[in-house]
Image (cartoon, rainbow, N blue to C red):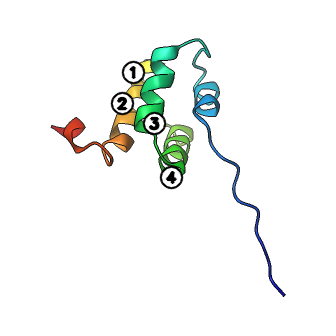
Amino acid sequence: MTITMKPAKEITIEYIMGMTETSKTAGAVYNKLKSLLITQKDRQEFVTRWINGYKGNQKSTTAIFKLAEEIGSYHYPEINS
């Protein structure tokens, strides 16, 4: 007997924007997130860390960019320079 598991629901950039209460018309935020959070693993890490209180006292957009850059730096090492 073969057991098949449903794949986990895909986390989209649109979902992340809604979760962080970012306007759907914020094209610059969308484009930055899309370029940094390339894989589902990246997006899952973003969601997990955000839910666990990453934002702190930072303005929302600043916190979003900072977290996305931390995660995206795995793909773009020059961000750390």
Taking the image as shown, residue 5 lies to the left or right of residue 78, namely right
Distance of mark 1 from mark 4, alpha carbons?
22 Å
CA gap between label 3 and label 2 equals: 10 Å
Inspect the image, locate mark 2, and give the three-letter code of the amino acid beneath it.
Lys
Q: Position of residue 15 (x, y in %)?
A: 64, 33
Disc 2 to disc 4: CB gap under 8 Å: no
Determine which residue is flagged by label 1.
Answer: 62
Q: Is residue 3 above or below residue 1?
A: above
The residue that appears at 42% across and 23% down in the rendered structure is 57
Residue 64, by quadrant, is top left
Do tag 1 and tag 2 residues touch (Cβ < 8 Å)?
yes
Q: Nearer the viewer, mark 2 or mark 4?
A: 4
Within 10 Å of the Cα at label 3, are there few (<14), some (14-19), or many (20+) other Cα atoms? some
Residue 75: which disc?
A: none
Q: Quadrant of the N terminus?
A: bottom right
The amino acid marked with disc number 4 is: Lys
Assign a secondary structure to mark 1. Answer: helix
- Dot 2: few (<14), some (14–19), or many (≥20) neighbours within 10 Å? some
Give the SS element for disc 3.
loop
The residue that label 2 is drawn on is: 66
* Chain-order first, disc 1 or disc 3: 3
Q: Please say whether residue 55 is visible from this viewpoint.
A: no
Q: Which residue is mark 4?
A: 41
> Between residues 29 and 21, which one lies in front from this camera angle?
29
Residues at marks 2 and 4, CA–CA distance in whole angstroms: 17 Å
Query: Which residue is painted at 54% across and 49% down in the image?
Result: 40
Nearer the observer: mark 3 or 4; the answer is: 4
- Asked if residue 29 lies left or right of residue 4, the reply is left
Mark 3 vs 2, N-terminal side: 3
Q: Which mark is residue 54?
A: 3
x and y percentages locating residue 34 in the rendered image = 48, 32
The kind of residue on which mark 1 rests is Thr
